Amino acid sequence: MSARDHLSISNAGGIGSTDTGGQRPQWTPDRETPVDRDLVEAAQRGDQAAFVDLVRSRGDRLFAIAYRILRDVDRAEDALQDALVIAWRDLPDLRDPDRFDAWTHRLLTNVCIAEAGRERRRIANLHVLPFDDPAAPDDLLTLADRDQLDRGFRRLSADERALLVLRHYVGYEPSEIADLLGLPAGTIRSRLHHAHRAMRAALDADARTAAVGGTSA
């Protein structure tokens, strides 16, 4: 069963309840199916039912992105709700309906980074998520590795986590991330490089701590 039981839009245009039931979010790392342009255009005209259909078709994916950045179910739900409120409000200004997914990913990423800035490093009682790197098939993770990996991921800044999620989970190329965030491609490549180095440094630090019998933060 999906981790997100439902998303609803209230009569006032706000986001209604979301419910994970305390479960892990479920997803696949593949790209989403193309967005239904007719639904986007209908939602732009104020059709709430069309927007609800869009949210239901994209909700699990969006929640997974938020969860991977924030590492906390409740905060991810709050961030997603905030992002959807903004999306509903600003959707009429979206010039290209085919860009709906990229547009919502950008909104959600910005909301998550802002949320992380308000409450840094809150430790949640969550199961670990693997760090998927399609460019490194020889770096496959065992179940035993995942706790260490999650601890390493938590050491990163929200901006670093966001970049790694967009690159390795959503599957965007650096040039696409640059377009998404409105930054030069060279800047994104540099930041991704530093994020990868930070992740490996965090893993190395955790391994050294484990080697002397301690526990990492």
Image (cartoon, rainbow, N blue to C red):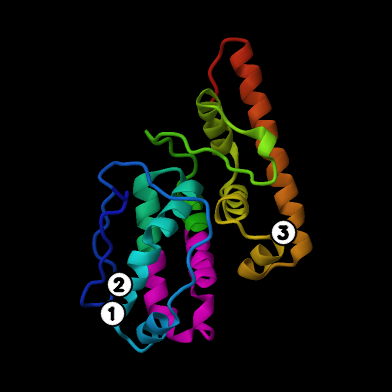
Which class describes the residues within 10 Å of circle 3: few (<14), some (14-19), or many (20+)?
many
Which class describes the residues within 10 Å of circle 2: few (<14), some (14-19), or many (20+)?
many
Residue 143 lies, with reference to residue 106, above or below; the image says above
Span of residues in magenta: 83-111
Q: What percent of the width, then of the height, locates residue 90?
A: 43, 80
- Which sits earlier in the primary sequence, circle 3 or circle 1? 1
Q: What percent of the width, then of the height, locates residue 85?
A: 36, 70
Q: What amino acid type should be assigned to the residue bearing mark 1?
A: Gln
Query: Which residue is rendered at x = 52% and y = 30% of the image?
Result: 146
- Which sits earlier in the primary sequence, circle 3 or circle 2? 2
Which picture quadrant has residue 18? Answer: bottom left
Q: CA distance from mark 3 to mark 1?
A: 35 Å
Q: Which mark is residue 141?
A: none
Main secondary structure found in the magenta portion? helix
Q: What amino acid type should be assigned to the residue bearing mark 3?
A: Ile
Query: Which residue is rendered at x = 41% and y = 66% of the image?
Result: 83
Which picture quadrant has residue 12? Answer: bottom left
Q: What percent of the width, then of the height, locates residue 38?
A: 40, 84
Q: What percent of the width, then of the height, locates residue 109?
A: 52, 60
Q: Secondary structure at mark 2?
A: helix
Count up the numbered dots.
3
Marks 2,1: beta carbons within 8 A: yes
Circle 1 is placed at which residue position?
48
Q: CA distance from mark 3 to mark 2?
A: 33 Å
Q: Nearer the viewer, mark 3 or mark 1?
A: 1
Residue 38 lies, with reference to residue 20, above or below; the image says below
Query: Which residue is rendered at x = 41% and y = 81% of the image?
Result: 40
Which class describes the residues within 10 Å of circle 1: few (<14), some (14-19), or many (20+)?
some
Q: CA distance from mark 2 to mark 1?
A: 6 Å
Circle 2 is placed at which residue position?
52
Circle 3 is placed at which residue position?
188
